[in-house]
Amino acid sequence: MTMLATTLITAAFGLGLLATAACAGQVAPSQQDGPAPGVTIVPASASPAADASADDQGFRRGKLVAFAAPAASPGDIVINTHENRLYFVLGGGQAVMYRVATAKKGFEWQGTNQVSSKVKWPEWRPPVDMRKRRPELPAYMAGGPENPLGARAIYLGSSLYRIHGTNEPSSIGKAASSGCIRMLNEDVTELYSHVKIGARVTVL
């Protein structure tokens, strides 16, 4: 990692990069093209020892990778929207990586927040702005397999942004949401079991 990259990621964590959009229905600042600064991702060894280490720590869905971000602490989540990947930081230069869906054009945002709550099979109340764009949406949907929030939701601060499951698995790996971070239901269930209330989440 270059000195400039290290400085940028340190500044991102230190300043908090507060998100400018208060809810998923609002349009947030667009991101610049190109690789996200400050995080160096190197695939971890494919050796049996590396795989065993991930299993030993209770991760069977995510991929163990080398992760160089000096300012990140164990338990932090870093989301690289340019790669559509989420990293759960283990410390010791490692993280568990998951493929995700991120915000589509016009709904991108960058920032840092904290996990404020976690919910199993969450209910869903689409924001007013979203229902204006998509009037066919219900005002309320109970939790369950047909709910777009999927099996688990990890809420970020007081915003309406979440890391959640999905009933659209084909969207994973794409820029497809209105601001939230989507994961496969099996993946978000695993992440949910490890992430703690108050954990720092940084979106790059």
Image: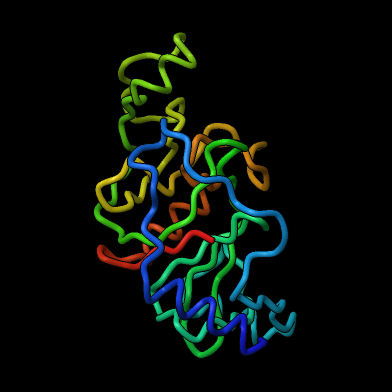
Image coords of residue 35 (percent x, y): 70, 64
Q: Quadrant of residue 16?
A: bottom left
Please tell me which residue lies in front, 89 or 58: 89
- Which x, y percent locates residue 71? 45, 83
Q: Residue at x 38, y 30 (%)?
A: 144
Residue 2 % position (x, y): 67, 87
**Which of the 4 image quarters holds residue 169?**
top right
Q: Is residue 24 left or right of residue 82?
A: left
**Residue 191 higher or lower than 173, as above or below:** below
Q: Quadrant of the N terminus?
A: bottom right
**Is residue 204 positioned above or below 20 on the image?**
below
Residue 104 in percent (x, y) is at 60, 38
* Point 67% across, 36% down: residue: 170
Residue at 31% x, 61% y: name it: 114
Query: Could you tell me which residue is drawn at 74 percent across and 80 percent down?
Result: 46
The reply, left or right, for residue 204 in relation to residue 158 is: right
Identify the image quadrant of the C terminus.
bottom right
Viewer-side residue, 25 vs 54: 25
- Above or below: residue 4 compared with residue 15: below
Q: How many marks?
A: 0
Left or right relative to 198: residue 82: right
